[in-house]
Amino acid sequence: MKHGEKQIVVTLSLPVVAPLLDIVKFAADRMQGTTAAPAALPDIDPEMKEAWTDELIAAQNADVRALLALFDDEFFSTGRISFRAANAEPMIRACAAVRLHLRSGPLAVLGDDVLETGEIALDRLEDPVRKAFMTYLFLATIQELIIQHLDETILDRKSTRLNSSHT
């Protein structure tokens, strides 16, 4: 880590998070050859579309691998993961990709309102849907932590808005 680089360390509950990581790993495996969100490019040359899609898939896979790498031996011994400003954007993208995959897969049975508000009786969900939903919320929480504390572009925009509103 570079001197002065922002970092947050989060301690997580192993019994709660470990099963969610299985869902993330399963989603990562399923997304290997496809983008998390379909790319509708009807007016583009097929070869260019294929090259563009291949690059998107490679970047998505790298981001998801980086996310999974946070949950290493240290995590399994201490329950801690750390985020740095340098990896904020890839982590946000990885969380978004897995969330999109879950949304179009096991969570497709739930409405957008439920996914956005999180208001649902978990005990009424079937086990696979409940686990996917908990993973979806977990990844949303990671995204929010990063956005609030590390994402420099967002922090810079907030600072600019605050400064311009006070001048």
Image: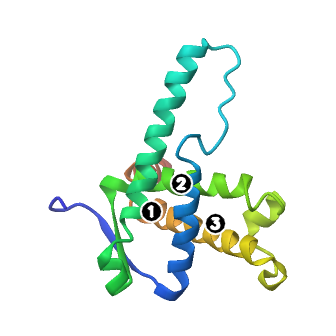
Where's the N terminus, which quadrant? bottom left
Placement of 74 over or under 43, stated as above or below: below
Residue at 52% over, 63% down:
25
Placement of 61 over or under 111, stated as above or below: above
Q: Is 135 on the left or on the right of 8, as rendered?
A: right
Q: Quadrant of residue 16?
A: bottom right
Query: CA–CA distance between discs 2 and 1?
Result: 24 Å
Q: In this orientation, which residue lies closer to the viewer: 142 or 133? A: 133
Q: Earlier in the sequence, mark 3 or mark 2?
A: 2
Q: Is 145 on the left or on the right of 102, as rendered?
A: left
For label 2, count other residues whose C-alpha is less than 10 Å away and answer few (under 14), some (14-19) or many (20+).
few
Query: CA–CA distance between discs 3 and 2?
Result: 16 Å
**Amino acid, disc 3:** Tyr
Residue farthest along the left direction in this orientation: 3
Placement of 41 over or under 167, stated as above or below: above
Q: What SS does tag 2 mark?
A: helix
Q: Earlier in the sequence, mark 2 or mark 1?
A: 2
Q: What SS does tag 1 mark?
A: helix
Q: In this orientation, which residue lies closer to the viewer: 90 or 23? A: 23
Pinpoint residue 119: horizontal percent, then vertical percent: 79, 74
**Labels 2 and 1 touching (C-beta < 8 A):** no
Of tags 3 and 2, the one toward the viewer is 2
Pinpoint residue 116: horizontal percent, then vertical percent: 73, 63
Residue at 65% over, 74% down:
134
Q: Is residue 167 visible?
A: no
Q: What SS does tag 3 mark?
A: helix
Query: CA–CA distance between discs 1 and 3?
Result: 16 Å
Residue at which label 1 appears: 146
Residue at which label 2 appears: 29
Residue at which label 3 appears: 136
Q: Earlier in the sequence, mark 1 or mark 3?
A: 3
